[in-house]
Structures are given as C-alpha cells and as structure tokens.
Image (cartoon, rainbow, N blue to C red):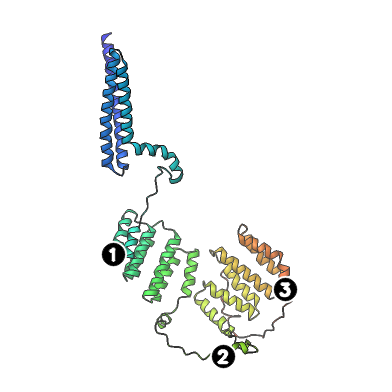
Amino acid sequence: MQPAVTSRSALDIILSLGSVVIVVGLVGWGMWVWLKKSDDPARLIFKWVLTAVGLVALIAVGIYIRNGIARGLDYGVAFFGVGCVAALGVYFAAIWRHEIAGLVAKPFGALYDGGNAELDPQAYYSIAQAKRKRGHYNEAIAEIRKQLQKFPTDYTGQLMMAEIQAENLNDLPGAELTIERFCKQPGHAPRNIAFALNTLADWHLKYNIDRDAAQQDLQKIVERLPNSEFALLAQQRIGHLASAEHMLSAHDRPRVHLSQGIQNIGLLQSSSHLTPTDGDPGKQAQQYVSHLAQHPQDTEAREKLAVIYADHFQRLDLAADQLQQLIDQPNQPAKQVVHWLNLLADLQIRHGAGFDAASQTLSQIIERYPNQAAADIARNRLDLLKLELKAMETKQPVKMGTYEQNIGLKHDFPHRRP
C-alpha cells in the first residue's frame, strides 16, 4: 500500500505545480497585455510594486490572525486584524482608484465611445496639412510618405502628395507620376480613378496649357473604365476641350472697344429693338453636326442640335432621333435620361405631336425608374397632360419658312448606333 500512497502524493504534487504554472502564466500574460496597452508603463509598474508590498503585508496580517486563533483569539487580536485589513483596503483603493472608477463607469461610457471596440487602422495627415499651410512643402511630403509606408494604397495621401507637387512645388511631372502609380494600384474605386485623372487634366490645362496632355489624361479614363458613366463624361469633356491657340489667346486678349450704350432707355416707347438677336440657327446646326462627327459622345451638343431641329426647322422627327440616341445610350445617369425624356415630351407638346406621343414618352420615365421621385413627377404630369396640351393650343402659332439647305438635316447627321 505504501507505493500507491507515494505515487498518489507525487501525482498531487505534479497537479499542484501544474496549476501554479498555469495560474502564473495567465497572470503574467494578463500583466504583459495590460502593460502594452498602458499610456504610462513606468507608472503602472510602480503601482504593481506597491501592490506587491501591500499583499505581503496582508499575508503577514493573515498569519498573525491565524496564530492568534490557534492560541485562543482574544478581542485585541481581532480588533488589530480588522483594523489592519481595513487600512490595507484603503491602501489598495488609493493605488488603484482611477482603475476602479473606470471599471465602474466603463459600461456607461461604452454606450457613447464604443468601449474597447478596435478602430480600423487608418492614415492621418494632420501633420502634413499643417506643414503645407506653413509653406514647408518638402516636409509635408515627407510626412505623407511616412503614412504611405503603412498604407501604400491610401487614396487621400497619394492625391494630397500629387497636389503639393503640382500646385506648390511646380513639379507637374512628379504629380503625373504619383497619379499614374495610384491608377495602377488594384482595388481602387472607379470614381476615385476618374477624379484623379480629371484633376491631372486640370493641372495640364492650368499650368502648362497643354491640351494634348489633358486629352491623354481623359482618354485614360475611357480606356481604364470602359462602358461606364465616367468614360462617357470623359469623352464629353474631350469634345469640349479648347484648342491650344484659344487657350494661349486668353493670356493676351486684345482690348475690345465698346460703343456707348443707349441713353435714357426708360424714356423709350419700346425697347424691343434693343434685344440681342440669336445667332443663325442654320450655322449653329451645321457646327453641331460637324462637331458630333468628331465627338459623337458630346451629349450637350446633341441636345442643342435636337432643339434647333424641332424649334427652328420644325423637324420633330430629327429632334426625336437625336434625343432617342441619348436616351438609349448605356451607362447614362438616370438624372440625364429623365431630363431628355422630359425634353422630348416638351418638344412633342410644343410641336403638336399629340397626347399619345407625349404620354408614351412620359411613361418611359415611370417604366425605367418606378421607385424614384422622377416617376412620381411624371405621373403628375400625365394627369395634367391634357390641360397642358390645351394651353398650348391657345397660343398663337408661329409661322416658319421652308428650309431646304443642306445643314445636316438630310445628309451627314449622326445616326443612332445599332
């Protein structure tokens, strides 16, 4: 029986030692995590030392009370022990008062600040912005680079660095390289890529008056983001880029001498003769047709051409064809499509296409965007459409002449894409 007892005692010792090791390990790990999260590690270690001293004193008091009980506890030992324990309690509370208060207030504070929820790591550029405002541009770029080492794909930092290079250091090639590196990084939102390249095009136009470079920047949007809203907007902007000669002439404009205005205009019986006349619609139509042959994605020019076709040449069919091309073009913003459908309905009402044609046009808005506010507006307009047509019929008709000039009405105007 002796060997069994010995083996059992050895097992108990091993289990006890194992439990002690586990407890010490858990306590050590908790203290290490606590120390890493502390704002003042030295102060925390000092508190641990004071706490250890207090624990030694508490153990000594416990031993004293136990020995007193063994000898037969009297009132003196009891009062002394209780007084020592109370004093040590005050001692520990003084050391850890802030932590105890925080532990009590933590559940309530977590309702407002999220408690111990980990924040997503992100770059901070407040130092770089402050240095840039003080004119320390190279130091600002150095601060941005520090953040980009941690967050190499951060959109805000890369664009800020390109802005400093282009706007403050006159280093447009450096800014162009920064934007190009940004665009080559995977995972960026198409909107951010389009904004960066549009900004680069602005810099080429503003600082170098380089139309070709700006056009290349915008063309990159078309190539990188094909069949998107951003590609359409870039193509439209390309169509509106001024020539290099026109941009250069803006810096050396000749002085224009204006004739004296009309005196005592309020005494005239009529001022209708002073109203400025519009340009020749025929010439404007021809210019738009030529422009659209080179830039077919220019929605603004096509819309203006459609209005001229309808209002000046009384060719509602040609106007409807131009607007329908815009409406059917993919990736157009809903706001623009609704605008063109309403414009087509306006022209149909204005030029006598009838109730059915206008109602079919407005119904397209409801079919395309049934859950948007535009659909509700279209429904309201449909309810009042007959009154709108009746009001238009009461207006005096305007007699127009017959136009047979080759202005793009019969030949060479842009047809709808298949």
Query: Of the residues tagged 3 and 2, which is closer to the observer?
Result: 2
Label 3 packing within 10 angstroms: few (<14), some (14-19), many (20+): few
For mark 1, what is the residue?
A: 138
At label 3, the amino acid type is Ala
Q: Earlier in the sequence, mark 2 or mark 1?
A: 1
Residue beneath the point at 34% across and 37% down: 97
Left of 7 or right of it: where is 246?
right
Q: How many labels were placed on the picture?
A: 3
- Density class for disc 2 (Cα within 10 Å; few <14, some 14-19, many ≥20) is few
* Residue holding disc 3: 391
Of residues 15 and 213, which is closer to you in this image? 15
Which quadrant would residue 134 be assigned to in this image? bottom left
Q: Quadrant of the C terminus?
A: bottom right
Q: Nearer the viewer, residue 218 or 60?
A: 60
Q: Quadrant of residue 370?
A: bottom right
Under mark 2, the amino acid is Gln
